[in-house]
Image (tube, helix red, strand yellow):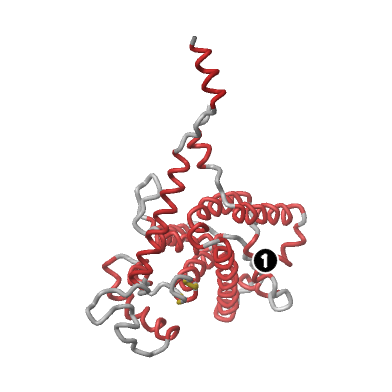
Amino acid sequence: MSSPGITSMFTNFTKLCKGLALVLVVGHLLVQFVPATVPYLALIPARTIPFGWNLITSGYFELSVYGVVISTVSLLFMGKFLEPVWGSKEFLKFIFVVNFLTYLCVFVTAIALYYITRLEIYLYMPFAGFHGVLAGLLVGIKQIIPDQEVLLVKIKAKWFPSITLVLSIASSFFTLNSAAYLPTLIFGTYMGWLYLRYLQRRPETKLRGDPSDDFAFSTFFPELLRPIIDPIASIFHRMLCGRSNPTSEDHGYSTSGAPLPGSDSAEASRRRERGARALEERLATERVVPPRNKEESQSDALDSV
């Protein structure tokens, strides 16, 4: 007999995530039973110019069984944490934008590699899968619950994206088709961070992005490398945010050094609190045993007599 806590852990998924999971499953079944649809749905760089829509469709189906299983399960579980914090509309927007930008970068990279190497494999290799978006969602987990130990291995959530990339890069030396998934994971991670860092709208402050130091690009790297990464990252930061040198109040601090109510640090703190609260509510729901009704209690009492 299964425990109610275990049962609820594998339920309570959001309707949006269930719908997206269904799209992934249906997309996989479609390309399996009708293989002729792959050139029209997957990103094949040589055919992207006439079939430009595959910059969008390529992310919503998997070519392998294990791929659709991993993508579906990961989406359902990560959606349980992120969607309540972001809201359904923002969650869907994040998935759409990150998926499009990821495969746009993959397309440009494949074309560049072809002109550098003159290998036609980069032009006709099919790129598809939801793993780019999943990499971006891991960045969202890093943002809202950075210090939360989610897995049994006691790893803090802020290291999930970095560990995923390190393992993927390491495994690429031992697999033949690493070019089909590694660029998608790398660009998915970066585009997820780019969106959350500079583009995501914050309704509480009417601002965009998360400029807090705890979410800087260098936080993906060990402490030892951050003095090297920060100057390089600051170049791209100035490209995206301009060359202006904001005042202390623009950064969210008063003249006394205290954070203002709508400041970056205060907003980042509130975001982490919302993420931790959402996680606690999910875990509490999974631990709660539903109370038995009166008829069941009376029946148990009669049985004991």
Q: Is residue 235 left or right of residue 103?
A: left
Outermost left residue: 256
> Where is residue 259 shown, x and y percent of the image?
29, 74
Outermost top residue: 305
> Where is residue 293 shown, x and y percent of the image?
54, 28
Closest to the observer: 205 or 210?
205
* Residue 176: quarter of image: bottom right
Residue 177 visible to an observer of this rendering = no
> Where is residue 147 shown, x and y percent of the image?
34, 57
Local crowd size for mark 1, using a 10 Å CA cut-off: few (<14), some (14–19), many (≥20):
some
Count of numbered labels shown in the rendering: 1
Q: Residue at x 32, y 80 (%)?
A: 231
Residue 167 visible to an observer of this rendering = yes
Q: Which element type, helix, strand or loop, lies under badge 1?
A: helix
Where 64 sits versus 10, above or below?
Answer: below
Closest to the observer: 231 or 167?
231
Give the residue number, with chain letter if any, for mark 1: 57
Q: Is residue 82 left or right of residue 247?
A: right
> Where is residue 150 shown, x and y percent of the image?
40, 50
Where 173 sits versus 195, above or below?
Answer: above
- Which amino acid type is shown beneath numbered disc 1? Thr
Q: Is residue 16 left or right of residue 51?
A: left
Q: Residue at x 54, y 25 (%)?
A: 294
